Image (cartoon, rainbow, N blue to C red):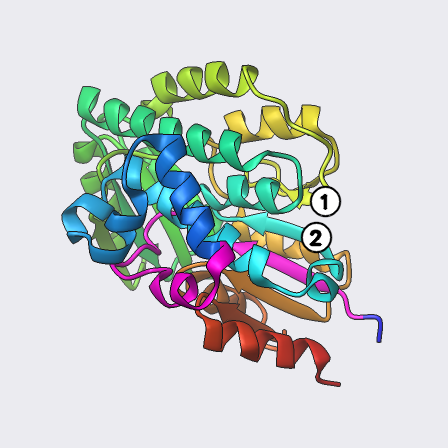
Amino acid sequence: MNRRIAAMFPGQGSQHVGMGVELAAAEPAVRELYEEADELLGVSLSRICRAGPEEELVRTENAQPAILLHGYAVWRTLPDEVRDAVVVGAGHSLGEFTTWLAAGGLSFADALRTVRRRGELMAAAGNERAGTMAAVLGLEPTDVVRVCETVEVGTVVPANFNAPGQIVISGDVEAVEAACAAALEAGARRAVPLNVSGAFHSPLVRAARDGLEAALSGISIEDPDFPVVANASAAPVTTGAEGRDRLVEQLTSPVRWVESIAAMEQLEPDLWIELGPGAVLTGLLRRIERRRRVTAAGSPKEIEALVEAFHAA
């Protein structure tokens, strides 16, 4: 059997209290990984994941390392034959870091500390300049770009091209509100404000980008074991040097997820897997391309189902 897998790792927003509990209970190696994370960060991330409270878990500086930790724990639990079959990977925003960790480009300690720092920087940027995000449903990408360009107050830009008819915009609060109104006038089905702490993937978090660049300059990034499709360019990256640049660039650039899926498709995967909490990316993939075989795994039972899917004809 010559299975070819595309691996996907979720971003912020997929976290939930209790994430990883079943997996840690079933796998001693995962429990050790969570204990190592607590020691590396000097924070009881395992307790936050296990028991919350939710308002503590959703804080950007906690949610980001928590999601990376869960995704990597699932990756480590997969049989070697499954991991060896991965021919391409991508992650949504934060998930790009988890992908580099799974691909061997980042060490666990460097990845965990860097995303913790990334979360702190993003939270600080949101406090320094208030911003927000909103999901625009039912408009073409060119129409959303045009709507953002017509707003005359503040800054608003497309932030996530998630799926056909689902684009997230980001920017100053007043500008996002104006863009939502303009989008509805242009024919959008809905414009939904998101509960976020800042204008992520926009110029408003430029200060966070500078801080992230400094953090990444102090760690080693190796060439990945499989190509990692970058959010910012929607192109496969095969060297650590380029990966460093793309990880910095993505913080203020839109997540080109639809184009990223198209780039992954070029590697001809016959099975798509999402590793970590939730199944957001699985849902997006089904909206982009319904015919693809995809399975999400975050618990022991789901990992078992993934392995069965791997062996299925």
- Residue at image point 72% right, 80% down: 311
Q: Is residue 178 left or right of residue 296?
A: left
Q: Is residue 114 left or right of residue 120?
A: right
Q: Are marks 1 and 2 in contact (CB under 8 Å)?
A: yes
Check residue 299 for magenta coloring: no
Q: Is residue 196 left or right of residue 3?
A: left
Q: Is residue 230 left or right of residue 62?
A: right
**Quarter containing the N terminus:** bottom right
Check residue 10 for magenta coloring: yes
Q: Amino acid at mark 1?
A: Pro
Tell me how far mark 1 sits from mark 2, CA to CA.
Answer: 5 Å
Question: Residue 228 versus residue 113: which sits nearer the camera?
Answer: 113
Above/below status of 119 relative to 160: above
Q: Residue furthest right?
A: 1
Q: Amino acid at mark 2?
A: Val
Residue interval drawn in magenta: 3-29
For label 1, the residue is 227
Secondary element at image label 1: loop
**Residue 154, horizontal then vertical, whole percent:** 24, 25
Question: In which image quadrant can residue 60 be found?
Answer: top left
Question: In which image quadrant can residue 80 be found?
Answer: bottom right
**Residue 72, horizontal then vertical, whole percent:** 52, 51
For label 2, the residue is 88
**Residue 295, horizontal then vertical, whole percent:** 55, 73
Question: Residue 258 versus residue 230: which sits nearer the camera?
Answer: 230
**Quarter containing the C terminus:** bottom right
Question: In which image quadrant can residue 277 be found?
Answer: bottom left
Q: Residues within 10 Å of mark 1 (few under 14, many from 20)?
A: many
Q: Residues within 10 Å of mark 2 (few under 14, many from 20)?
A: many
